[in-house]
């Protein structure tokens, strides 16, 4: 349907082949993840969603995340705010928390057990509480809806379709999403993998989180990957 409505746009999907040269030559690219949170889908725990994002000149400008089991629809358009429709209720405008003290914050992490490195991060930050849930979109939605304040994804395995829609929803709710080193996540690269991980926050404590993470990343031997394959 998107291809029919927007014939000049390119679609990048988790389930389709990537036409790199065509994709990186177009101004607008849709980024679709039919099932974000595969383990949640397989385990039938409800923590999975459908994500549709739109980028323009390498930046996320529109996002939709639908969590069918929870009957929650998150959506945002650049400059127009972020909203949540839950059940039969009307749209609720989203606004992140303003917390700046890590000891008062709640971090969202993977539903599976904490990895030793993530446990080390949690202990160093001294977060007030931890929420374990699946799906990038769901965890970012928790920040946008003030049920969490921070999300750190240490793994380099997420891809553009995992982060695009959640990013614009978070940013329109007042939050920020960057890589672990504080650099912007761009979507006009040849390589669609987020090699430098994801740091999502309420924005108020983002720069401080980047600084605090730096020593831990050094401890882990985690070096910043430079991707020069920009279109």
Image: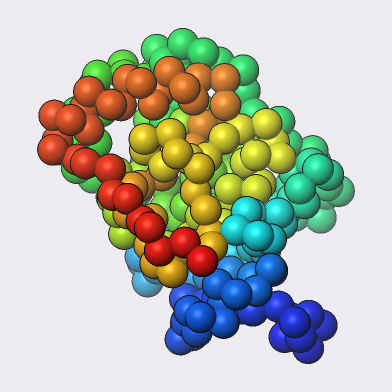
Location of the N terminus (image quadrant): bottom right
Q: Residue at the spot x=82%, y=83% of the render?
A: 5
- 198 is higher (above) or lower (below) than 33: above
Residue 34 location, quadrant: bottom right
In percent of width and height, residue 160 lies at 48, 62
Residue 80 location, quadrant: top right
Q: Nearer the viewer, residue 81 or 214?
A: 214
Residue 190 location, quadrant: bottom left
Q: Residue at the spot x=75%, y=43% of the render?
A: 82
Q: Nearer the viewer, residue 119 or 25?
A: 25
Q: How is the image coloured?
A: rainbow
- 63 is higher (above) or lower (below) than 19: above
- 147 is higher (above) or lower (below) than 3: above
190 sits left or right of 79 in the view: left
Q: Is residue 220 visible?
A: yes
Q: Is residue 192 visible?
A: no
In percent of width and height, residue 185 lies at 49, 48
Q: Residue at the spot x=50%, y=42% of the render?
A: 184
Q: Nearer the viewer, residue 4 or 9?
A: 9
Q: Residue at the spot x=51%, y=13% of the render?
A: 100
In percent of width and height, residue 72 lies at 67, 55
In percent of width and height, residue 99 lies at 55, 15
Q: How many marks?
A: 0
């Amino acid at each position: 349907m998107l291809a029919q409505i927007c014939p000049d746009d390119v679609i990048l999907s988790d389930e389709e082949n990537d036409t790199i040269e065509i994709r990186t030559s177009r101004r607008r690219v849709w980024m679709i993840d039919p099932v974000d949170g595969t383990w949640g889908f397989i385990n039938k725990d409800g923590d999975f969603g459908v994500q549709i994002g739109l980028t323009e000149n390498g930046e996320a400008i529109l996002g939709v995340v639908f969590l069918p089991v929870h009957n929650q629809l998150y959506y945002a358009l650049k400059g127009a705010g972020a909203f949540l429709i839950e059940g039969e209720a009307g749209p609720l405008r989203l606004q992140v928390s303003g917390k700046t003290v890590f000891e008062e914050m709640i971090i969202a992490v993977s539903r599976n057990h904490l990895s030793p490195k993530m446990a080390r991060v949690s202990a160093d930050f001294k977060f007030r509480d931890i929420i374990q849930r699946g799906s990038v979109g769901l965890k970012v939605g928790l920040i946008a809806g003030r049920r969490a304040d921070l999300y750190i994804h240490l793994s380099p395995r997420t891809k553009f379709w995992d982060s695009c829609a959640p990013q614009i929803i978070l940013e329109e709710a007042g939050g920020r999403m960057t890589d672990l080193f504080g650099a912007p996540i761009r979507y006009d690269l040849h390589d669609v993998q987020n090699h430098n991980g994801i740091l999502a926050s309420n924005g108020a404590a983002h720069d401080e989180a980047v600084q605090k993470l730096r020593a831990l990343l050094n401890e882990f031997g985690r070096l910043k990957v430079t991707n020069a394959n920009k279109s």
